Image (cartoon, rainbow, N blue to C red):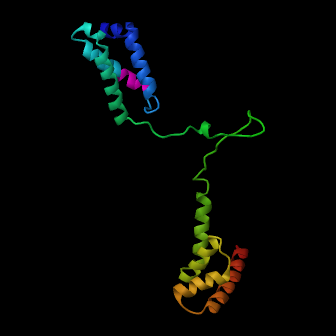
Amino acid sequence: MEIIELIYKDKKLLTMVEEAIDRAGTSVTDTSSLEETIYARIARYIKPDKGRIRHYVTLRKFIYETISDYVARYRNENTIVFSGLAEKDDEDDDNENLFEPADVLANVESDVVVKEMIALLAQDDHRKKLIIGHWVSGNNNSMDISRVLADSLGGSIESHRKYIQRFRRDCHDLLEAI
């Protein structure tokens, strides 16, 4: 306990530790733990001979070695605070638009409903699944879909186009009935 008191009474040593920790503050997540580690290492060095507290060059070496080891083990995580993502309005500096993270679980139910609807409409037909897949992705062009079907399944583009039109009407009628 008296060694720690001796360390805290030496202003030059405290200043060296504080400056070193300030420089390492951007690389380390928990500076208080680093500070405790540095003071423990200094205390181990001073314990056999209290006169070693004046060995500033050696103590500075210990401080920076400890910081280097600590940074290698406990590297700062590249995180951004949500408040740092707040957008300010150009007109009024006091008005901030807070960042709201996307709720990934919010659309789970709608995704399940969409998949069940696709399974209901496709009825285990590969061609119907391909057509509905294009519709879900936003492609409503029957000619484009019929070309893809002709390339992948074979057959005439025109016959696939007519099938898509009939299938669209059937799906529309089935969905209206539900």
Question: Is residue 84 left or right of 70 when viewed as pictured?
Answer: right
Would you say residue 32 sits in the magenta stretch? yes
Dominant secondary structure (helix, strand or loop) of the stretch shown in magenta: helix
Among all residues in the image, which is located at the extreme front? 57
Q: Nearer the viewer, residue 82 or 167?
A: 82
Q: Residue at x 40, y 9 (%)?
A: 11
Q: Residue at x 42, y 14 (%)?
A: 15
Question: Is residue 55 left or right of 18 when viewed as pictured?
Answer: left
Residue 9, horizontal then vertical, whole percent:
38, 6
Image quadrant in which you'd find residue 41: top left
Q: Is residue 96 above or below residue 113?
A: above
Would you say residue 74 sits in the magenta stretch? no
Q: Residue at x 57, y 88 (%)?
A: 150
Residue 48, horizontal then vertical, whole percent:
21, 11
The answer to whether residue 125 is visible is no
Q: Nearer the viewer, residue 105 or 160?
A: 160
Q: Magenta segment range?
A: 31-37
Question: Is residue 66 left or right of 76 when viewed as pictured?
Answer: left
The answer to whether residue 122 is visible is yes
